């Protein structure tokens, strides 16, 4: 699996809140230097408050805003297309997501989810808590396929490592999204 990951971290550098962009290429993680101190936007006092994060990717330019303040702009040419996902790593990572929208460069909506349905059709194995997506601690990465008109069926084997067919059933055709 290959993708970008933007992490907001308050545990690595005591008293500071950092934006830590990463990328995973064929399963190997690397940080996208430099890390960005966003303590002027997300303070220790507002660390657990709701924040609005906007990330734009136009060509190789990736720009990040938090609560309306541009905090980072960088260039990376590794990926030219992809989906959307959320990560919850070890037991110290906690997050909730709501009202996620992905727009195309022409302004069209490619993906939109307000997490008002349980189970969520795009993230059927991820809990919804108070209308917010809540990736479980230690659950790894949960992904949705952006640009498709309908979410995957809950019993579809997409994005799973393995699945079991019902007795007597065979695979007539399969599609892999990479």
Image (cartoon, rainbow, N blue to C red):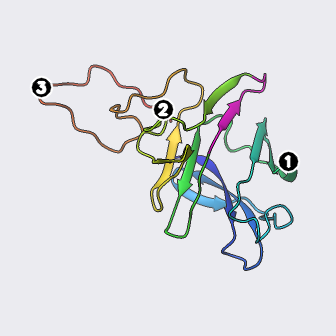
Residue 22 position by quadrant: bottom right
Q: Main secondary structure of the magenta part?
A: loop
Q: Which residue is mark 3?
A: 168
Check the image and report above or below for 143 versus 153.
Answer: below
Residue 69 position within the rendered picture, expressed as x and y whole percent measured from the top left: 87, 51
Q: Residue furthest left?
A: 168
The part of the chain drawn in magenta is: 98-107
Check the image and report above or below for 153 versus 127.
Answer: above
Q: Which residue is at the front of the view, 98 or 39?
A: 98
Q: Which residue is mark 1?
A: 68
- In this view, the mark in front (2 or 3): 3
Task: Please tell me the numbered disc located at residue 171.
Answer: none
Q: Which residue is mark 2?
A: 177
| Mark 2–mark 3 CB contact (< 8 Å) | no
Disc 3 to disc 1, how far (Cα)? 55 Å
Label 2 neighbour load within 10 Å: few <14, some 14-19, many 20+: few
């Amino acid at each position: 699996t290959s993708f970008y990951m933007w992490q907001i971290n308050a545990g690595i550098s005591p008293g500071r809140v950092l934006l830590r962009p990463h990328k995973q290429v064929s399963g190997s993680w690397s940080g996208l230097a430099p890390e960005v101190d966003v303590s002027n936007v997300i303070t220790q006092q507002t660390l657990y408050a709701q924040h609005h994060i906007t990330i734009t990717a136009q060509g190789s330019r990736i720009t990040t805003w938090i609560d309306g303040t541009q905090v980072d702009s960088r260039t990376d040419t590794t990926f030219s297309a992809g989906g959307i996902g959320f990560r919850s790593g070890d037991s110290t990572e906690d997050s909730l997501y709501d009202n996620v929208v992905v727009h195309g460069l022409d302004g069209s909506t490619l993906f939109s989810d307000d997490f008002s349905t349980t189970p969520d059709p795009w993230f059927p194995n991820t809990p919804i808590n108070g209308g917010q997506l809540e990736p479980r601690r230690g659950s790894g990465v949960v992904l949705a396929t952006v640009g498709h008109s309908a979410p995957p069926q809950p019993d579809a084997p997409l994005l799973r490592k393995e699945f079991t067919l019902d007795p007597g059933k065979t695979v007539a055709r399969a599609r892999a999204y990479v």
